Image (spheres, rainbow, N blue to C red):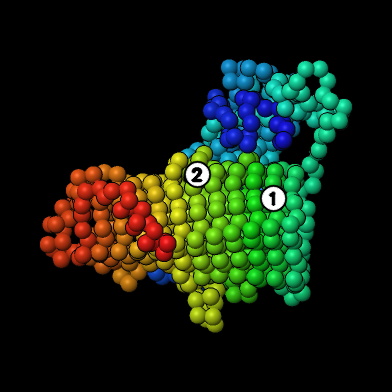
Amino acid sequence: MRAIRARYPNADPELGFGSDLHAKSWLAPTLPTEPDREVNPDVPLRNTTPRMFQKYQLGIGGPCKYFSPPAGYWCGNGTSGGGAFSYKVPSGMVADMSILPNSPYKNASGAVVQTWRPSHWASWMFEVGEYDSSAGTFHFSKGGFQGARGNSKGDNFYIENVFEELDSPNEYFFDEKTKMLYFYYNGTGMPPSDTQYVIANIKTLFNVTGSQAKPVKGITFRGVGFRDTAYTYLDPHGMPSGGDWALQRMGALFLEGTEQTTVDSCIFERLDGNAVMISGYNRNTTIQKSEFAWIGDTAIASWGYTTGAGIDGMGPNGTDGNQPRFNNILYNFVHELGIWEKQSSFYFQAKSCQNLLQGNIFFNGPRAGINFNDGFGGGSNLTENILFNTCRESGDHGPFNSWDRQVFATKVLDGKTSSPIKAYDNISKNFMIANYNSQEAIDNDDGSCYYETHHNVFSYSGRGMKNDFDGHDNHHHDNVYAYVGSGFHIVAQLPGHEDYFYNNYLVMTKDGDYGDGTCSGPGKTVVHDNKVFTPKGKVTECGMSLAEWQAKGNDKGTTAAEWPKDEEIIAAAKNALGM
């Protein structure tokens, strides 16, 4: 059982964030607004988008001064995409007795305020430095770097690690000055004499570190239990690339500079940081037939290094191969994660490519189940996975999410030529239920490109396919979308880089437009041969009925009909999955 650090409101963090408390106000950011230096090289140039995400962009220092390394996409002046602005976080908050009934506190130094970023894109943790009990003002001394997308305010919050909040069974408080541990026992009288208290103070259980020049080879972990590591959410975080994530480069199992590492039939449970970190140069890492449960942050993270920006591990050049490649993430059972950091996933990758995710089952997470923070290299394959109960505590996502804002050059496309154009990533034969707050099944956000998505079954969500903010060359075909709001939402694209939506079986929750794409001119969305079902069989496209649109020579082969029977949808799903 995980004991709970004394907090208000009382709640079990394993069951969710547990607070709808809002501060009276948030103190203005005090971070520098300008980077010390920017990196915006003219090459590599990705000229496949109309206007955004064509060149590498990085800000060094300034607002990124507390990241490790102190640089990131969101600390420069050239950020683009949905709701884009440079990183910033509040410097404190005001919350008096009307909000915190057990305040004023005698000593709030060292308390931790956990809060959602507005829009629930990530959660932040701030350590309290100075506290003005008369005004209810908490000044933050550390934190807010647990997400790359900042804001001047927080959202709902709770406070922990305060003695006055020790008032509920299974809570504890450790007094740093007196070295006294207080525990609220859930029972009558004293706790049994044989009660054991385990204090987690180790953050990494196994560290396997070599180098690209001298890799550690052939290590196997089989049948090993990994459990009870300390939280890491206030440890140094970095911005891995141009996505929304910030991440600590650490895990209960840390791998860097390895080849042929195997993790087989292991159990990872109640780890308060990341479970597995695959960092830098790794080749053919296999993680299979293992269970991950009650994880504080992310189950498996894969994060590489690049060069060319004059700061360690960062820059547009990924041709040296100092990244995790050819990961095999196979047949794992993953559930209950993101206990602390809500911007977490079953699998995350940044500056990592050519990986295989097959046969995994994931459910019960606060955000996307699988997240690609960039389009580095491409060539990854997601197949035969089952994902559901994602986005349980957040919004603007789906079971799978990707971004591609930051341009990298690799040799993955043809194996020999340095190019900013990635190989296609493949998403096939997966079953994804986009319930809770999922906006779409596949969220190819900001600049995402070159995805081949086919023969999947997607249930629920507002949209089946999303390609936003200069994304392009994404193809959805031979999929089943069961009870979605619409089939696709696609932005304008350059000629030769259009999105495709064809041969799909689409069951919509309402009559009307079955997609939102480019209806005419160069870059027109390629749409044809879909089977569309609505409550009354009334389908529109590009501002007119489907029949009128087709009479003008568009969307050939697509049909519209009333909702099919359940057994017909199930048969179509089995056919798509090859069952």
Q: Is residue 306 left or right of residue 455?
A: right
Q: Look at the numbered disc 1 and give the secondary structure of its residue.
A: strand
Residue type highlighted by circle 2: Asn
Q: Callout 1: 10 Å neighbours few (<14), some, many (20+)?
A: many
Residue in front for this viewpoint, 345 or 227: 227
Residue 446 found in image quarter: bottom left
Residue in front for this viewpoint, 24 or 359: 359
Q: In this rendering, is residue 103 above or below 147?
A: above
Q: Is residue 372 left or right of residue 4?
A: left
- Numbered badge on residue 268: 1
Query: Where in the figure is residue 56, as x and y percent of width and height?
Result: 52, 65
First reached walking from the N terminus: tag 2 or tag 1:
1
Residue type highlighted by circle 1: Phe
Could you tell me which residue is drawn at 79 percent across and 47 percent down? 202
Query: Where in the figure is residue 375, as x and y percent of width and height?
Result: 50, 64
Residue 23 found in image quarter: top right
Residue at image mark 2? 389
